[in-house]
Image: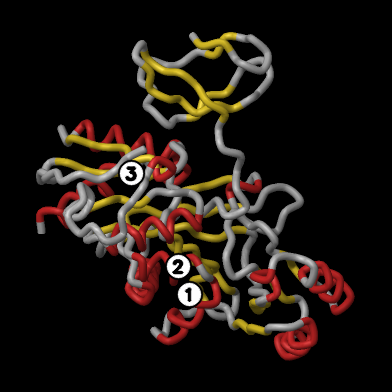
């Protein structure tokens, strides 16, 4: 277990908080090593934090948050920020990005184009919301990733079946969040934002027999040019949610042009590096280090 | 080399491995997390992908 004493945090050190080392975390570690930094990979599962100790070894650190578990991510960010650490991304960003309903509210308020959405809180409310939004519609869990439990509701019968299933699940799944189905090419865009720049972007194409574009579901990727329009909407979305290093997911609506449907606060970027050749891990390390020194 | 606790096959640990990294048994497919030990690495069963994983 990592328990806290008191220790200084030199400006040439970096802490990466993880719960599972994926390609991304290893790439960040290696990028930090290449820069001659003292890098600590901190396993969230080993943390035992005194939430009242403002002089812990973590209190003056800048910590790159890379936990893949949403709940570990948001709660360890809260705990570490609470004792004085600067976590990238912040608790505010983790909360807002991690919940599709919250994200929608902030994106809409900031004038960032995003699919029209409805929320409902009961079976009857959900069916009424769908009557308003029309079919087909997309149901998404407010919290979730990799396309899990996202469904395309083509008609009322399908909707009723899915909603009935939801009524027997954990209560978070009875918070109904629906998005208007956006007519688009069979691809979406993942753009990586580091600070004030969109450093790279890819098109993510749906896998065979799949309408969702998540790489986790077997899609494939191609490089996407970072246009001024893409950059502007990505930076607006990032600012709206308080992010610093994020992955912005967008659709190319046939009707409305680029629309943001999600901002990821612990973004995966393996495919973006593979396809674009941009050294994203080094850019993330440099940004984090600049925040530490700044 | 580490022996797979499930099937006894040999799991190769690349020289650039770091603690926390996941290795997979080439024979049975079981996944393990690398844990530092006095003579290199040991393994423990990797976390199963959680319902709240992703981005």
Q: Distance between the residues labelled 1 and 2?
A: 6 Å
Question: In what quadrant of the picture does the N terminus of chain A appear?
Answer: top left
Residue named by callout 3: A278
Question: In what quadrant of the picture does the C terminus of chain A appear?
Answer: bottom left
Q: In this view, does A3 lie to the left or right of A171?
A: left
**Is the Cβ of the residue at disc 2 closer than 8 Å to that at disc 3?**
no
Q: Earlier in the sequence, mark 2 or mark 3?
A: 2
> Same chain for marks 2 and 3?
yes
* Residue nearest the viewer, comparing A62 with A30: A62
In this view of the protein, can residue A122 be seen by the observer?
Answer: yes
> Same chain for marks 1 and 2?
yes
Residue at x-position 17% and y-position 49%: A289
Residue named by callout 2: A97
Q: Kindly identify which numbered label has been placed on residue A267.
A: none
Q: Which of marks 1 and 3 is nearer the N terminus?
A: 1
Question: For residue B38, which quarter of the picture?
Answer: top left
Secondary-structure class at tag 1: helix
Q: Nearer the viewer, mark 1 or mark 3?
A: 1
Up the image or down, A11 lies above or below A192; here it is above
Residue B15, how many percent across, how many down?
37, 15
Secondary-structure class at tag 2: helix
User: So how many labels did they put on this image?
Assistant: 3
In this view of the protein, can residue A247 be seen by the observer?
Answer: no
Say few, some or many: other residues with alpha carbon within 10 Å of mark 1 (under 14 / 14 to 19 / 20 or more).
Answer: many
Q: How far apart are marks 1 and 3 (CA)?
A: 28 Å
């Amino acid at each position: 277990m990592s328990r806290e004493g008191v220790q200084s945090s030199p400006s040439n050190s970096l802490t990466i908080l993880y719960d599972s080392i994926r390609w991304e975390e290893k790439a960040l570690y290696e990028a930090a090593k290449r820069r001659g930094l003292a890098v600590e990979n901190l396993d969230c599962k080993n943390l035992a934090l005194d939430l009242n100790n403002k002089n812990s070894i973590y209190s003056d650190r800048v910590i790159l948050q890379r936990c893949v578990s949403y709940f570990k991510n948001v709660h360890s960010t809260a705990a570490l920020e609470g004792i004085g650490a600067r976590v990238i991304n912040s608790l505010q960003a983790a909360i807002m990005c991690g919940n599709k309903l919250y994200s929608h509210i902030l994106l809409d308020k900031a004038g960032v184009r995003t699919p029209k959405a409805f929320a409902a809180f009961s079976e009857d409310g959900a069916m009424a919301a769908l009557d308003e939004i029309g079919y087909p519609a997309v149901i998404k869990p407010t919290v979730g990733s990799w396309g899990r439990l996202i469904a395309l509701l083509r008609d009322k019968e399908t909707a009723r079946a899915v909603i009935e299933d939801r009524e027997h699940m954990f209560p978070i799944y009875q918070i109904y969040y629906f998005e208007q189905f956006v007519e688009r090419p069979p691809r979406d865009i993942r753009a990586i934002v580091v600070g004030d720049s969109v450093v790279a972007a890819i098109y993510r194409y749906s896998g065979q027999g799949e309408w969702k574009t998540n790489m986790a579901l077997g899609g494939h990727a191609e490089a996407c040019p970072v246009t001024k329009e893409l950059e502007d909407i990505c930076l607006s979305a990032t600012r709206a949610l308080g992010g610093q290093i994020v992955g912005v997911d967008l659709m190319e609506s046939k009707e409305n042009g680029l629309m943001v449907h999600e901002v990821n606060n612990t973004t995966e970027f393996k495919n973006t590096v593979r396809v674009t050749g941009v050294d994203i891990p080094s850019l993330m390390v440099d940004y984090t280090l600049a925040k530490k020194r700044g | 080399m580490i022996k797979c606790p499930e099937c006894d096959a040999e799991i190769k640990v690349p020289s650039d491995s770091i603690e926390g990294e996941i290795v997979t048994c080439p024979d049975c497919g079981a996944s393990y997390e690398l844990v530092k030990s006095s003579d290199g690495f040991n393994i423990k069963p990797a976390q199963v992908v959680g319902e709240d994983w992703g981005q």
